[in-house]
Structures are given as structure tokens and as C-alpha cells.
Amino acid sequence: MLKSKLFYCLMLICLAGTGYLSAQTQNWKLDPDSGFVVVNITGTSTLSDWKVTNAGIVGIPAQLSFDPKDQNQIVEFEFKVPVDSMDGGRGTSMNTKIFEAFQSSKNPFVHYQQNQPATLTETSEPGVFTIISTGTLSMAGMDKPLTVKCTGTIKNDTLVIAGSKDLKFSEYEMVPPSAMFGQIKTNDNVVISFEIRYLKQ
């Protein structure tokens, strides 16, 4: 009888614990009505700073499920930036030079593919956690391993994942865009930054 009661209590504890963990798992879906993703490339040149904005990002997971308090993981993640969506903000001539630098005719996308589960770690700030994602960045026909540290922020049923990464054109054997017959030259260092928004389901 005592063993039977003990077994029953243990079962209740296990079930309660399972319910608690399930309650902590959060499900999110892309928020298409608020510019759900922004990817920018910024850098400098011999004339001024510059910024390339992107539209039409594809391949992002439509849904995410994780528990930031339980050292959970984001198992799969990727996105593609169509090169022909890049806009340097200075007209067709500038954009053509960007497309040439990225060799868009042969390599139409900048593609990030996560190749192992991303780890989530809570910070001391409520609703904020760090994400470490390791994968491969494909750009201008070259694949390079990449580790990105991102910040996840949950506020008012909205999840924002934001991060940035310093890169060099030369790492991908790219020739930086130039203008005025080479008098204006783009420097080698660039920063790729992104922000992705999800809504709680």
C-alpha cells in the first residue's frame, strides 16, 4: 500500500514537472506586417560612409519554439539575401557596382545556413537572452564558417533577434566596389547587421 502511494506521488511530481517545462516553451511566428526582417551592409570609403539595404529576404524559419530559461536551443536557422535586392541608395550605377562585386549573375544570394543548434543563455536583464549561432556564410561563390552572437529580446509578445558581424571583402576574394575610375574606393571592412521580428503564438 505504501509503495503504491509512493509510486502515485512520484508520478504526480513527474507529470507536474513535465507540465511546467511545457508551459515554459514559447512558440513564435514571423511578423510579416512590421517589416519582419532587416538586413543591412555598412562600410566606409575614401569619400564617405555607405549603407546597403536589402529587401525580399527569404528562407527564414516561419516559426520558432524554445525555452530561454531552460538552456534550450534553436535547432535550425537560415536566411538568404537576394543580391539584386541590394540598394546602395545612390542610383542604378552604384547598385550595378554592388551586383558586380557580389558576382550576382553566378551567385544570386548571400546565404547563411546554421549547421548546429544555436545555444540560448539568459542574461541578468529580464526578457533578454544571448544566442550563439554557428554556421556557414556563402557570399560571392565562397563558403566560410561563421559564428554570430545575437541578442534576443522579448517584450509585449514580440521577439526581436538582432545581431551583427564584422567581415572583410577580401575574406571572400571579392573586389570592393569603386567609382570615378578608381578615385573613390570602398574599404575592405564591412558590417552585416540584421533584425528579425516574431510574434508570440
Image (tube, rainbow, N blue to C red):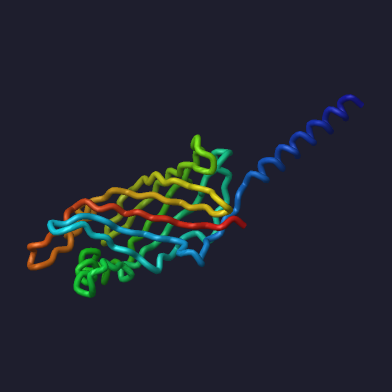
| Residue at the far right in the pictured view | 1
Above or below, 178 relative to 22: below
Up-down relation of residue 171 to residue 51 (above or below): above
Q: Quadrant of residue 13?
A: top right
The spot of residue 26 in percent (x, y) is 60, 49
Residue 109 appears at what percent x and percent y?
33, 65
Instruction: Say which quadrant the C terminus sits in.
Output: bottom right
Q: Name which residue lies at 41% across and 59% down.
A: 79
Quadrant in the picture for the N terminus = top right
Residue farthest to the bottom, as pictured: 92
Q: Position of residue 176 (x, y in %)?
A: 17, 59
Depth check, front residue: 15 or 95: 95
**Farthest residue toward the top?**
2
**Which residue is located at x 52 percent, y 52 percent?**
159
Name the one closer to the observer, 126 or 38.
126
Classify residue 11 as left or right of residue 61: right
Find residue 194 and report its image quarter.
bottom left
Residue 87, how many percent across, how many down? Answer: 29, 68
Please count the marks in the image.
Answer: 0
Q: Is residue 139 above or below residue 5?
A: below
Position of residue 118 in the picture relative to residue 169 (left or right): right
- Residue at (67, 45) in percent of width and height: 22
Q: At 36% from the left edge and 45% from the top edge, which residue is drawn?
A: 147
